[in-house]
Image (cartoon, helix red, strand yellow):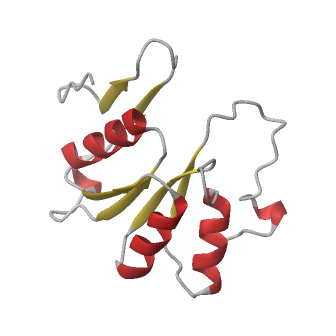
């Protein structure tokens, strides 16, 4: 993992076969001393670790899960400030995790990760699909 703290954000270059780069940008004014508590859920170990490491570098407390069952267990037991969910997981997809948490009254904000890269892919997490919170 490539981390350059002098850059405008934290840049992580994934293995050559993934052809993906993500950047997490954070400004000092927006970040509090405690940084917040996040849950990162992805079944791909390298990506899960890279996202978690980048967020920890920025000062966040990060828990990780590799499947939907563990994600639900952790999200129900801990008051996370944000969930970062892979859409496609081996047991329960990310959208179903959010549906279940919302039915239980958990309003935690969510960022979805996906390998889908076309604009024509309709996201079940979009407002037009009924998932507005």
Task: Report the number of discs.
Answer: 0
Write the residue at 71% across / 59% down. 125
Residue 13 shows up from this direction = yes
| 42 sits left or right of 61 in the view | right
Residue 18 is situated, as x and y percent measured from the top left of the image, at: 51, 20
Residue 25 is situated, as x and y percent measured from the top left of the image, at: 35, 39
Residue 25 shows up from this direction = no
Between residues 75 and 37, which one lies in front from this camera angle? Answer: 75
Residue 37 is situated, as x and y percent measured from the top left of the image, at: 29, 65
Residue 51 quadrant: top left
| 12 sits left or right of 22 in the view | left
Residue 1 quadrant: top left
| 118 sits left or right of 82 in the view | right
Q: Going by the picture, which residue comes out furthest to the front?
A: 91
Residue 61's place in the image compared with 49, above or below, is below
Write the residue at 76% across / 51% down. 123
Residue 52's place in the image compared with 5, above or below, is below
Give the quadrant of the C terminus.
Answer: bottom right
Q: Going by the picture, which residue comes out furthest to the top?
A: 16
| 33 sits left or right of 51 in the view | left
Write the residue at 84% across / 36% down. 120
Residue 96's place in the image compared with 56, above or below, is below
Write the residue at 44% across / 65% down. 70
Between residues 11 and 88, which one lies in front from this camera angle? Answer: 88
């Amino acid at each position: 993992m490539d981390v350059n703290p002098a850059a405008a954000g934290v840049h992580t270059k994934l293995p050559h076969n993934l052809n993906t780069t993500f950047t997490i940008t954070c400004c000092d004014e927006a970040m509090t001393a405690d940084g917040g508590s996040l849950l990162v859920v992805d079944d791909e170990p390298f990506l899960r670790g890279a996202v978690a490491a980048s967020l920890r570098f920025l000062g966040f407390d990060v828990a990780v899960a590799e499947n939907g069952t563990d994600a639900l267990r952790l999200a129900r037991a801990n008051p996370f400030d944000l969930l970062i969910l892979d859409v496609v997981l081996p047991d329960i997809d990310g959208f179903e995790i959010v549906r279940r948490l919302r039915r239980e009254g958990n309003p935690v904000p969510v960022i979805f990760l996906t390998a889908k890269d076309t604009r024509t892919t309709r996201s079940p997490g979009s407002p037009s699909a009924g998932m507005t919170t």
